[in-house]
Image: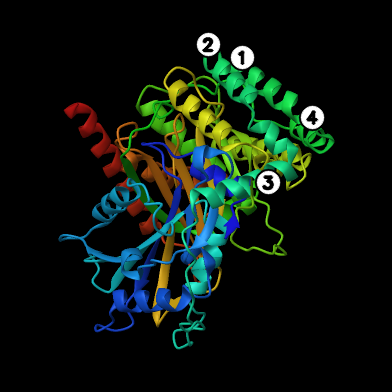
Amino acid sequence: MQQLTGLDAAFLYMETPTTYGHVNGLSLYQRPSSDFKPYEVVRDRFAAMVGHIEPLRRRVAEVPFGLDHPYWFDDPHFDLDYHVREIGLAPPGNREQLGEQVARIIGRPMDRDHPLWEVYVIEGLEDPDHWALLTKFHHATIDGAAGVIMLRMMTELAPDAEFPFVEVPWEGEPVPSDKELLQHTIQHMVANPVKATRLSLKVVRNLADAAGITSLSGAASRAREVIASAAGRSEESAQLSEQLRKVSMPLTPAPPTPWNKAVGPHRRFAMRSVSLDDIKALKNATGGTVNDVVMAICAGALREYLLRHDALPDEPLRAMVPVSVRTGLEEDPWTNLVSSLVAELPTDCNDPLERVARCRDAMQVAKQQLDLVPADAIMRATDVTSPMVATAAIRLQARLADRFNMPVNVVVSNVPGPREPLYMAGAKLDGYIPVSTISNGVGLNITVHSYEDRLDFGLVADRDLVPDLWDLVDLHIDQIDALFDAAGVERTDRSGKQKKAAAKKSGTKKKAARKKRAAQKRAAS
């Protein structure tokens, strides 16, 4: 039995009836032969991996009354067939149908009576030579960087390579009783007086008082006072509090957008893939980084989307950008090691090149602020935060989501993936599309993942707040076109040759068709 870190546990506390803590990935594979059976291959692989990889077999035990962080223990009733599932799309099985099926699956909470993961083999795609695999892991189990590690463990570097895992016997642990969990909690409270302080009724009362404050900044100030009063009882916590004060999420509300409201239980998912070489060409032409260009593309797409909906604020939007703080030397490769920074998205700017420059400047400032805090400061802060406090804060956020804007508008994440081709029993991985999560007040997530020579955009949104998510993901492609035009550079194909003018005309026709569809939708409404 192993206790969750405070950061791992935080992803459990964040869950409500409409917000979920799982993160997902959609892999597209090409069949090596017509008789290839994806479900059998995937099931056999996870059967072999479960004895070697702890997150696949451990489930969570919650401490009574939320007095301490939960514990992992190996599930004595593990059922592989519960976790590995197979579904099929109805004809024609196009990308919109695939996106709808993914949205339905991610819109369901995970059962904490089982290890917190599920995988879905998806057949019936429009291209019969391909099949899909949707992986669904709770963020308490692994973070985005660990998800890339998991992807590598599931695959090989050559089509004829041997899978390195073989089934090994393992035994589950007895389900811990409430008495046993409470005994562990008492021991930790004695060993850690700061944690005991955080569990005190005074903190709970102060949070209740904060719920009655009518301004977001007032509530934030009150929360800081509570933290400072508790942290002051320990020299270590006082130092930690001082470190965290050096950098903080802006407390002023971000400008309003249609998706900055309380979210419902249902989701939408849309995806597009672009050439990584194209993004690198834009990087070289603009003097930014790949991430700067991606941020600028997102800013331009959001600007155009909000203009079409007559909802563009005068002020620039703010993005929360998750940042991995892994060093590669961690004892536990699966525990969450992630922080985040907040950067301006120049949605108030009409110039594509200026947007790249402003994104570059905003990211540099945000990174400098993040560097002021030791990498483990957030982890140590969550370790001494009571589950009761965390849960109360999440509930407060849910209640305030429709009354006050959050400090950020959208999550934008760029996760680097493998550059080499990957295979699963000979089936080539053609793409890996990230499928992330949303929260109350921030009902839109844009995550990008690189693999080989492509960049995959995965957008997740509340189903009602962003009903035309496919239009938004297509606008990202339009922004890439706009950047090429503004930078005065020509695209190259994979062989390094300039693309023909006909390709540009084709792209112009597709863009016109998308605008026509959008106009028809507006006329119909």
Instruction: Answer with mark 4 or mark 2, whichever residue precedes in sequence.
Output: 2
Question: Within 10 angstroms of label 3, few (less than 14), some, or many (20 or more) residues?
Answer: some
Amino acid at the residue labelled 2: Thr
- Could you tell me which secondary element the residue under label 1 belongs to? helix
Instruction: Answer with mark 3 or mark 4, whichever residue precedes in sequence.
Output: 3
- Rounded to the nearest angstrom, the CA distance separating label 3 from label 4 is 17 Å
Residue 381 at least partly seen: yes
Residue with the mark numbered 2: 214
Residue with the mark numbered 4: 233
- Could you tell me which secondary element the residue under label 3 belongs to? helix
Q: Position of residue 501 (x, y in %)?
A: 40, 57
Q: Residue furthest left?
A: 91
Query: Disc 3 vs disc 4: Cβ atoms closer than 8 Å?
Result: no
Who is closer to the viewer here, 120 or 174? 174
Who is closer to the viewer here, 348 or 46? 46
Q: Which mark is residue 218?
A: 1
Question: Within 10 angstroms of label 4, few (less than 14), some, or many (20 or more) residues?
Answer: few
Q: Position of residue 143 (x, y in %)?
A: 55, 54
Residue with the mark numbered 3: 188
- Rounded to the nearest angstrom, the CA distance separating label 2 from label 3 is 36 Å
Quadrant in which the C terminus is drawn? top left
Residue positioned 65% across, 41% down in the render: 382
Query: Disc 1 vs disc 3: Cβ atoms closer than 8 Å?
Result: no
Instruction: Answer with mark 1 or mark 4, whichever residue precedes in sequence.
Output: 1
Closer mark to the observer between disc 2 and disc 3: 3
Closer mark to the observer between disc 1 and disc 4: 4
